[in-house]
Image (cartoon, rainbow, N blue to C red):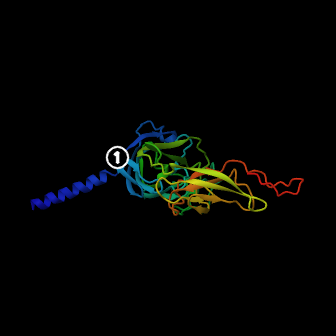
Amino acid sequence: MIERLLFFLFVSLGIASSGLSQTINITNITRTGRFSTCTNGIPPTVTATLVNSTGTSVAGNTLVCNDPCGTTTLRIVLSDVRWDQNPGANWVHGLFFPQNPGFSVSGIGLPAGWTAFSSCTGASCSAGQTGGQGFYFDGTGSNSCCSGATAGDGIANNNYGDQLIDCGFAFSFQFDMTFCNSVITSTSLDFQLQGTADGNTGCWTTADASSNTITFSLSTTACPDIYNIPFVSTLVTDCSVTPPNYYALITGGCGNGNTVTWWDAPFGGNQIGTGVPFVYDPPGNACPAGTTLYASCCPVGATNCANRQAVAITGTCPPGPTATHTKTDPLCYG
């Protein structure tokens, strides 16, 4: 019996230690605007735990990036948050992050009436501010100028904000946050949550001019540089055709051993080639000088998070064939 209890205790402690090892240190928690003007002065708290990843791990409460091509999902608990409704009787209506490629959030434990939305733009009687991906209050049908609104109708901008949340009533949010590993470039990773009043993203006539933010930093170790084999472009003139054709020959490679893919945009866009050396030959006999291509050392499927490197084609294309006054072949310079 004692052996079983000891075994159970050992396993329980192991699980607990494993869970703790996924916790990431949070520093530099700051707040501005209505998040900071309540007289009780109690600061918010933020915790972060790794719940899923490709290419990151936690060591010593630091988020370590091993592969910039992957993604990381953290569970964030934001608690002890207070909002000053005065002046203007502006109730809190939105809490969101700036828009970033590959970034998303999903609610796990939200206050009553709050729902995740990809964005929200205030109604016509408000300031009409557009907020990014985050959480907005959809828990009432009351408003200043929006008709037909009902609580929980899936339309965030036809509501007042949350009347309950003020200096005397703290609120908490628990949500999962997913982002591209490629943003981990130093020993800390900063995030900023912006809060909006119902006079900005909701349906209330008094706009709020304050900048209401909560900022925090994660302890991180930067991703390795996978673009450590420089890409070099060389202009080439092909005189075997008339008029001559111009193209760029690009050399270089990936420090992580992956095959280079070539794109026409820093995110998304179209794949235009694979491998090195790569020949970029624009249509017709156009000169490729001045064109910027984008090299990726990440898998093709990682188009939202591919940390592509811009490769500028420099130089000047020589003039085309010039006929002399004598009966000689045209001269092709370059």
Estimate the x, y position of residue 11 in percent, counting from the top left: 21, 58
Instruction: Name which residue lies at 54% across and 47% down.
Output: 196
Front-most of residues 39 and 71: 71
Q: Count the marks: how many?
A: 1
**Quick one: SS at disc 1?**
loop
Front-most of residues 310 and 120: 310
Mark 1 is on which residue type?
Asn
Instruction: Name which residue lies at 52% across and 41% down.
Output: 86
Occupied quadrant, residue 241 = bottom right
Q: Residue furthest front?
A: 327
Q: Residue furthest left?
A: 1
Estimate the x, y position of residue 84 in percent, counting from the top left: 49, 42
Residue 54 seen in the current view: yes
Q: Residue furthest right?
A: 325
Front-most of residues 244 and 14: 244
Estimate the x, y position of residue 114 in percent, counting from the top left: 48, 56
Q: Classify 10 Å Cα crowding around label 1: few (below 14), some (14-19), many (20 and above).
A: some
Estimate the x, y position of residue 101 in percent, counting from the top left: 55, 55
- Residue behind mark 1: 61
Occupied quadrant, residue 109 = bottom left
Quadrant into which the N terminus falls: bottom left
Front-most of residues 143 and 261: 261
Residue 201 seen in the current view: no
